[in-house]
Image (spheres, rainbow, N blue to C red):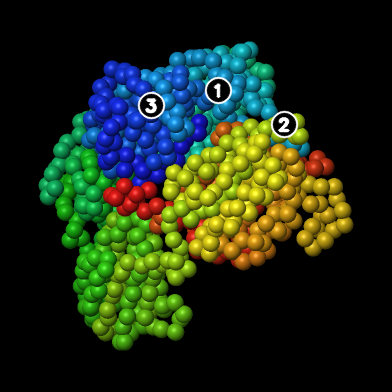
Amino acid sequence: MFRKILSATTALTLLATPIAAGARQAEQRLAPGAPVSGRLQSGDDTLDSGEFRDAYRFNGTAGQRVTLRMTSSDFDPYLILTGPGGFSEQNDDEEAGQPAAGMVVTLPSTGDYLVSATTYRPGESGRYTLMLANGGLARPTRPVESSGTTQPTRPRNGAQLSNLASRRGQPARTPTGNVGMLEPGAAVSGRLESGDATLNSGELVDSWRLNVEAGRTYTVRLNGTGFDPYLMVRGPGNLSEDNDDDGAVRGSTASRITFTAPASGQATVSATSYRPGESGRYQLTLESGGASTGRQPTVSTSAESLIRMGETRNGRLARGARTLTSGEYVDDYAFQGRRGQQVDLRLVSSDFDPYLQISGPGDFSQWNDDAPEGGTDSRLVVTLPADGRYVISATSYQGGETGAYRLSLADGAGYRPTTPSTPGVPAAARTADMSVGQTVDGVLQAGDDTFPSGEFVDRVRFAGRRGQRVSVELTSSAFDAFTILTAPSGSRIDNDDAAGGESTDSRLDTVLAEDGTYTVSVTSFAAGETGSYRLSVQPSRGSERQASVEGGPRVFAVMVGVSDYAGRSTNLDYTDEDALKLAESLRREGVLNPASVTLTNAEATVGGVREAFRRVAAQAGPDDLFLFFFSGHGGQSDPEAASPVEPDGRTEYIALRDGNLTDADMADLFGGLRTRLSMLVLDSCFSGGFARNVVSRPGVMGLFSSEEDLTSAVADKFSAGGYLAHFLRSGMAGEADVDGDRMVTAGELTTYLRRQFVRDVEGVEAETVDGQRSYQNLVIDRGGVQVDDVVLRLADLGDAASGGH
């Protein structure tokens, strides 16, 4: 399924924007179970990208599960759902190749939700039906078309790859498919038989859908009669798991997968066989555990109690209470918390070893065995990540322990962590609060808290948000300054001397990686040093190199994809869509310059590509990024005399509709660029051979889907022409922005792509032109591009307030 990329800015703008004056369809309310019919037509409201849309609203409550479905026989439907707090979900194809859009969503908050009924392409119009229903609706069993299949491919040693020399394999044969919903605790039965869908490697397969929640653990078991069962799970957050035999049962031919969902959404469980053509009856079961962190609960036999802030409750762990899977009894207490609130939880008992856990919105979970102050009592001081309902679990360290306890819930704003002190020196921790943009003065002196190594320390806190760049500067003429910055999660960075090493002052310039309260520990390099100091926490734009990079439509791109080779070579699946989807993604993020050009199939001639390159490059200036992207066939010439540029004597080329562009041709084209940064991205066989020719001058970065002498494969499981094309699109749309500062740097993009390849492409086979076998590997050559160099600056989320993108 292809997901259009909708930026968070656009999502917020959609939710806040009323229907334009003069629109034919006035905004309507949706009621569960009452389908509505409408028509998209000229005069309707439009998205920024030109698609007509009708808007509908409904009231939802936190935790409510709803199904939305839009069908049309006149156009390709597209659904966008936005809601409180920037919530956004979208869907193009409910099932691969089907003209319907649908989603099953658990609403995160109580409030007003906006449904935008729109189209996949600008200007499409016609009639449609839209339905809202409570709960998740099962999809009926029906045939799956052979075109646009999303049947997963399976990494297995010895699997045959068809047509490797021409880069792309043939799509799976999928005449029919069993599509149903799996529910936790339920078992379903089925049969693998002739006429079922098949994998590329020939195995029959039935597909079942499963709604998963981020952080929750699931176990799927497949037992078969007459064949060796094999399980595959694919889902949101790049979830990909395979299993042949249940390793927990010696000699078993059954299959079992236990996985923790990396993201919420709908996953697909594929029941298949180890060998092609095997058939027989099977049973598929699903079990759902708790959140992956902490201990996992079983069925509760006791209701939760409510506890108020400042209250202390006496209780008793006893037989008949709820138990964890590891055998401990547990009592649960619930309270309403707010984002940024700090709470102090204590569990005290003389009858057993106390153990505390707190869980809440967004799969938040923390736990503690022994309090930091020592002893066997348990204490947690946490900053709540969101508004909502939290549950405190009072339990024991060992299974079966019982006895009386005392639980308290207090305001943690005044909490002061205890740090071991130097013998003979009293601990009198000084903790102050400040805001970003402020400066405070202080004094390190005898009586302050100390580190075990003898340095005095003052602690100053400030509230930060993910993606915020700050400069923390500590200056003193009395001692050698040393700064430690501790994040809400406990991660730390420190600095002794400011950049350059010529000063004894300390300076940290960093991007905050999470929301919450940060602590600056003001201390000295040597033990026992004292004196006055000044601490400043200021907003920062980062390095001059980063600060000078402008946002907006600064990506000048030539994007080329060839699927239809008109008999010149074998046709390919999805490669033309790779170029179209990349252009769509960059355009929706507001970074693609209108001068950019997309060429597919018959448009992608040698002359057409050269002319597009020349025209776009002429408009790209020293503040811009130039991107050349290609997805299609690649090849190597017959060997000639070896040279420093071609050590193997072979020239690499990309195959266009009517001819080839060689690595030397590409070097000539890139030689005329005068941009801040330029990127060559090739998703084709043997593409790594271009690196030596093109990435030979400052400011050029190359991304290649395979090594110089190896083929590349179609990313069938993502319905993409290539893995690099698929991951590049999501990475440049923001997923590679690890620190949340709305800039994708060369280092972030490199790391993101490599991690995705390790996860999803590690077992994909490849071969050389003379038949040597290996595996597909990503090639990245940054040349002189530094890791902190900015590839592109994404639209700021704050732009939504002014309707910007």
What secondary structure is marked by label 1?
strand
| Between marks 3 and 2 in the image, the one whose residue lies nearer the viewer | 3
- Image vertical order of residue 420 relative to residue 294, above or below: below
Amino acid type at circle 3 is: Gln
Please say if the residues under marks 3 and 2 sit with CB atoms less than 8 Å apart: no
Q: For mark 3, what is the residue? A: 41
Q: For mark 2, what is the residue? A: 566
Sooner in the amino-acid sequence: mark 3 or mark 2: 3
Of the pair 435 and 630, the residue shown nearer to us = 630
| Between marks 1 and 3 in the image, the one whose residue lies nearer the viewer | 3
Amino acid type at circle 1 is: Ala
Q: Residues within 10 Å of mark 1 (few under 14, many from 20)?
A: many
- What residue is shown at x 41% (from left), y 34% (from top)? 51
- What residue is shown at x 31% (from left), y 19% (from top)? 36
x then y, percent, for residue 761: 61, 42
Q: CA distance from mark 1 to mark 3?
A: 43 Å
Q: Residue 374, located in which quarter of the rendered image?
A: bottom left
Please say if the residues under marks 1 and 2 sit with CB atoms less than 8 Å apart: no
What secondary structure is marked by label 3?
loop
Q: For mark 1, what is the residue? A: 271
Q: CA distance from mark 1 to mark 2?
A: 37 Å
- What residue is shown at x 30% (from left), y 27% (from top)? 24
In the picture, measured across the screen, residue 420 lies left or right of residue 99, that is left
Amino acid type at circle 2 is: Ala
